[in-house]
């Protein structure tokens, strides 16, 4: 087991009706004037924003509002939020929504607390030293931003989607009411489940073979997500399944399932961010569209780890040889994705990139990560392009 620091400072308030505690929680963490930040309309339509406003008013917390966050949140709205917060004297951020809204709030928080151009932090030119405090009210179980150290923003000009990881942006509190996720379209529920799975898969598929507890936690989480994601495809109103998925979303990305690893292999995430930046697809669907191609491309670098994954998590019976077991496991994973309505290639994602677009995505990803991506197999630009081509059906790698 490698040395590690586990830092999970977020107070979790979980369960039915917990959004009513928003005002009291802001007060507890010292907020006096809040930016209520939200997306394109779902939080208003469901009545959630009304409840949050009431809770803030009852606690004597003043607030201003900024809606309009889009999936793959835009830098321009972040700039707008920074200006608004400065003008209004906001001292606490309250995103109500999913990863996009929470990430947008984190970026606003960086911008206010550090000055200068906030994009520098996403462009890796500077490292933020602080962030305005925030608390999150989660409406979709997916990105896990409510407990993560991450924020992902898209600069519209050039379609550049980049993440910034820093402990300063960890939320002070997260309100998680699984009932709030019942209004999600089935596709978004499934995208969320895919993303949750991937956050632990990418920590799990690495080069560390000597972990018992971290592996057990990760395997238990992944089995739980697969089991409950399938329940939700037929029974979207099942509270218990919603609750399991929601709790998994936070634990999958707060660092717990990566303690003691080598940091994990984030290739699929980084490569998906290029797809999202160029084609504006839902993040979870972008991930499943390339995972199988990535897995087939890299598994021979650490077959033991992949075999452990497919037998313990997917329940694949050992085949004639290790290779066959892994190949069957990759197919089983893709069967699961299809069963919850997720794509397993670019065409199913609704994207048909040209060879030039594939080269451009590989080049942008390569530049962003110094032509050195992942740990199972270190990917260079040509490898990334090959994986994109496989996912687009232009190239086949025989496993
Ligand atoms: O905008 P509204 O109208 O609210 O609609 C949203 C949006 O269209 C809708 N939605 C959310 N809650 C709903 C609802 N619709 C009905 N009922 C509800 N209760 O769902 C759509 C997707 O929302 P979004 O916030 O984009 O989803 P998600 O949580 O998957 O966030 C995706 C973003 O997070 C980034 C992704 O790259 C992407 O930009 N990530 C952030 C991470 C982090 N900060 O730790 C890690 C992830 O790996 C990921 O990269
Ligand atoms: Zn993700």
Image (tube, rainbow, N blue to C red):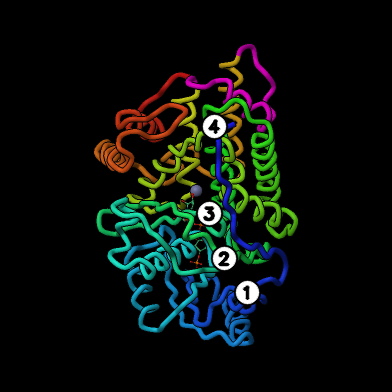
Residue 213 among magenta residues: no
Identify residue for label 2: 172
Residue denoted by label 4: 205
Q: Identify the secondary structure beneath mark 3.
A: loop
Q: Residues at badges 3 and 1 in contact (C-beta under 8 Å)?
A: no
The image shows residue 39, relative to residue 334, as above or below, that is: below
Report x, y in % for residue 185: 57, 59
Would residue 376 be visible to someone looking at this image? yes
**Number of the label disc, if any, that sits on residue 79:** none
Question: Label 4 crowding class (10 Å Cα cut-off): few <14, some 14-19, many 20+?
Answer: many
- Residue 221: x %, y % from top left: 67, 43
Contact, mark 3 vs mark 4 (Cβ under 8 Å): no
**Mark 4 close to ligand 2, CB under 8 Å:** no
Span shown in magenta: 300-321
Which label sits in the foreground, 3 or 4? 3
Q: Which of the pair 359/143 is nearer the observer?
A: 143
The residue that mark 3 highlights is: 148
Q: Nearer the viewer, mark 2 or mark 4?
A: 2
What crowding class fits label 1: few (fewer than 14 Cα within 10 Å), some (14-19), or many (20 or more)? many
> Is residue 318 within the magenta segment?
yes
Residue drawn 40% across the image and 63% down it: 107
How much space separates mark 1 and mark 2, taking CA atoms? 9 Å
Q: Is residue 216 left or right of residue 85?
A: right
Residue matched to label 1: 25
Asked if residue 354 shows in the view, the reply is no
Tag 1 or tag 4, which sits nearer the N-term?
Answer: 1
Query: First in sequence: mark 1 or mark 2?
Result: 1
Q: Which sits in the foreground, 119 or 361?
A: 119
Q: Quadrant of residue 227?
A: top right
Mark positioned earlier in the residue sequence (3 or 4): 3
Query: Looking at the image, which residue is at 33% across and 63% down?
Result: 75
User: Along the line of sight, which residue is nearer the eye, 51 or 58?
Assistant: 58
């Amino acid at each position: 087991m490698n040395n590690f620091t586990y830092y999970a400072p977020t107070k979790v308030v979980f369960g039915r009706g917990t959004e009513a505690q928003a005002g009291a929680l802001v007060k507890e963490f010292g907020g006096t004037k809040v930016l209520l930040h939200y997306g394109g309309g779902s939080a208003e339509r469901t009545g959630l924003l009304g409840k949050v406003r009431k809770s803030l008013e009852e606690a004597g917390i003043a607030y201003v509002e900024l809606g309009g966050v889009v999936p793959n949140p835009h830098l321009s709205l972040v700039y707008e939020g920074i200006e608004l917060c400065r003008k209004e004297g906001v001292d606490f951020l309250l995103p109500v929504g999913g990863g996009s809204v929470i990430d947008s709030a984190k970026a606003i928080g960086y911008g206010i607390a550090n000055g200068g151009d906030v994009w520098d932090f996403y462009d890796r030119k500077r490292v933020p030293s602080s962030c305005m405090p925030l608390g999150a009210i989660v409406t979709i179980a997916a990105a896990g931003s409510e407990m993560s150290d991450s924020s992902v923003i898209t600069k519209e000009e050039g379609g550049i989607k980049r993440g910034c990881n820093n402990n300063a942006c960890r939320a002070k509190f997260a309100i998680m009411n699984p009932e709030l996720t019942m209004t999600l379209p089935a596709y978004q529920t499934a995208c969320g489940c895919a993303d949750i799975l991937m956050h632990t898969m990418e920590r799990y598929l690495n080069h560390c073979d000597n972990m018992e507890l971290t592996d057990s936690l990760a395997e238990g989480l992944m089995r739980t997500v697969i089991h409950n994601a399938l329940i939700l495809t037929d029974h979207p109103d099942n509270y218990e399944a919603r609750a399991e998925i929601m709790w998994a979303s936070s634990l999958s990305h707060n660092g717990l399932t990566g303690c003691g690893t080598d940091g994990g292999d984030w290739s699929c995430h980084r490569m998906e961010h290029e797809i999202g930046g160029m084609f504006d697809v839902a993040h979870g669907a972008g991930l499943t569209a390339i995972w199988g191609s990535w897995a087939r491309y890299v598994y021979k670098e650490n077959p033991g780890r992949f075999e452990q994954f497919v037998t313990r998590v997917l329940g694949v019976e050992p085949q004639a040889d290790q290779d066959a077991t892994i190949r069957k496991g990759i197919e089983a994973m893709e069967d699961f994705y299809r069963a919850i309505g997720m794509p397993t290639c670019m065409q199913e994602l609704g994207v048909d990139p040209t060879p030039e677009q594939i080269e451009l995505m590989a080049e942008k990803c390569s530049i962003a990560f110094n032509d050195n991506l992942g740990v199972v197999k270190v990917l260079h630009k040509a490898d990334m392009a090959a994986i994109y081509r496989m996912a687009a059906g232009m190239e086949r790698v025989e496993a």
